[in-house]
Image: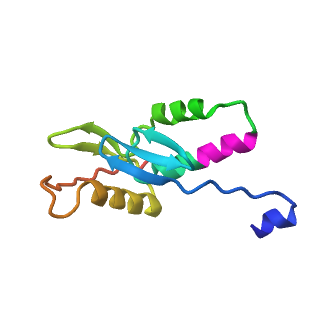
Amino acid sequence: QKECEKMNVLLEFPLTPQIVNSNICGIEFLYGTQKLHTAMTGIYQPENAALAIKAVKCLDADISDADIADGIADAKWKYRFEVCGEKPYWIFDGAHNADGMNVLSKTLKEYFPNGSETERRIKFATIFIT
């Protein structure tokens, strides 16, 4: 913020999205008064979408709210809490740093809380490329 002030650059922040409903199939959330849906199920995805929306608005591009909603609904990102199978669930996530692992942990706890009927059996596979 101080750097932006020094450079006389306006610093913009997105609105905080409000989750309306979330489950293993997707997340419905409000961005301002606009109700949006993403099939990306990580609990952090509404925040990512809010940042993308703000970026589009700052560009002053001729992109309608309906086009933004369609883009968010259609967006996919491989291995970001990607559900690839059920009974049992097969979930792939490419968390590759401490922040990513923390958010992955929160997302797993959100969808598979202690005491749920769903058995929580988690296996990790890690590939290091050098």
Residue 36 appears left or right of 42: right
The residue segment tinted magenta is: 51-59
Q: How many marks?
A: 0
The spot of residue 113 in percent (x, y) is: 23, 61
The spot of residue 64 in percent (x, y) is: 64, 31
Please tell me which residue lies in front, 26 or 66.
66
Q: Residue at x 73, y 34 (%)?
A: 61
Q: Tell which residue pokes out farthest to the bottom in this image.
A: 2
Colour scheme in the image?
rainbow
Instruction: Look at the image and say whether residue 2 sits in the magenta stretch.
Output: no
Please tell me which residue lies in front, 17 or 114.
17
- Is residue 33 visible in the rendered image? The answer is yes
Q: Residue at x 60, y 35 (%)?
A: 65
The spot of residue 77 in percent (x, y) is: 45, 38
Residue 78 appears left or right of 16: left
Please tell me which residue lies in front, 127 or 116.
116
Q: Residue at x 44, y 57 (%)?
A: 100
